[in-house]
Amino acid sequence: MRILVTGGAGFIGSHLCDYFLARGEDVIAVDNFLTGSPDNIAHLQHHPRFKFMRQDVTDYIRVEGYLDAVLHFASPASPKAYITFPIQTLKVGALGTHKACGLARAKGARFLLASTSEVYGDPLVHPQREDYWGNVNPIGPRGVYDEAKRFAEAMTLAYARAHNLETRIVRIFNTYGPRNAIDDGRVVPNFIGQAIRGEALTVHGDGKQTRSFCYVSDLVEGIARLLASDERTPVNLGNPNEMTVLQFAEKINAFTGNKAGIIFQPRGVDDPNRRCPDISKAKRVLNWEPRVSLDEGLEKTVEYFKKKIVG
């Protein structure tokens, strides 16, 4: 196969490149480094089956030769990133998805959209199932990401209906692992970075809001299974083991031996109270569920962050 990954220098995108190259496929990564990093794909620079294109995918994407699949992962994905780059976030969800779908259609390739649990907003249904329409504030600061991804899903299925494009949609819940950006702004890199530096961990609000954490290798395996499947409607991928942010902070301090404790700050606008996937559909149609324990995943992630921070 010949696979193109937009956002290929990002956290998840770069792991997808590794996965498909290890399977013997040819991979083209496209990224403009707005939030992705050259470091994430530096080890692939001389790989004979890897090609990198530096480009903004909101512009026309020109690729010579055939493609079997287009995986659209280009987008700022953390609150810090999409609040810093609100217009770019909206453009890559709208124009970028349009261009990526158009490329897939022109090449007769299968198209897979990276959507997000953020399409559920601050959910009123727990855990979140794919048939839940969400509770989103379209004009709040997080709305630029939520609505960009909701539009991207609509665009993807419009191409499926109007042009018979083979499409797949994955809704990604909190994912962590090596290559998470240290300044990402999300809870895992925030807490691990603070703990390694011996700082108090910053918990927003009272810490009773919940999250669940999926290790990146589990997620990538689920994405590959979805790409190969016949499932055309969105599929949640994430870890259903829910815990409070405060519990997670305490775990990180214990895991790293950090004695600096925890401090509390006000919560951000529209920060979800609960976030946990119902993965019964993924189990049924993909025979997938996460297998990496939180302790195992944290061990690999903390080791990566130590090398980045301490050297």
Image (cartoon, helix red, strand yellow):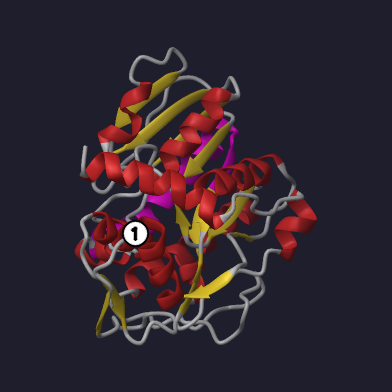
Q: Is residue 254 left or right of residue 18?
A: left
Closer-to-camera residue (262/27): 262
**Quadrant occupied by the N terminus:** top right
- Whether the magenta-drawn stretch holds residue 258 is answered as no
Residue found 59% across the figure and 29% down from its top? 68
Q: Secondary structure at mark 1?
A: loop
Closer-to-camera residue (244/84): 244
Q: Residue 111 at what x, y percent from top left?
A: 57, 43
Q: Residue 237's image quarter?
A: bottom right
Q: Residue 103 at what x, y percent from top left?
A: 47, 37
Closer-to-camera residue (100/52): 52
The answer to whether residue 22 is above or below residue 100 is above
Residue found 29% across the figure and 83% down from its top? 267
- Whether the magenta-drawn stretch holds residue 102 is answered as yes
The answer to whether residue 102 of the structure is visible from this angle is yes
Q: Amino acid under label 1?
A: Gly
Q: Residue 273 at what x, y percent from top left?
A: 45, 83
Residue found 41% across the figure and 37% down from its top? 14
> Which secondary structure is most common in the magenta stretch?
helix
The answer to whether residue 111 is above or below residue 30 is below
Magenta range is 86-112
Q: Residue 20 at what x, y percent from top left?
A: 55, 29
The answer to whether residue 209 is above or below residue 231 is below
Q: Is residue 21 left or right of residue 61?
A: right
**Quadrant occupied by the C terminus:** top left
Q: Residue 134's image quarter?
A: bottom right
Query: Which residue position holds label 1?
Result: 257
Q: Badge 1, how many Cα within 10 Å: few under 14, some, many 20+?
A: few
The answer to whether residue 86 is above or below residue 299 is below
Q: Is residue 244 left or right of residue 85?
A: right
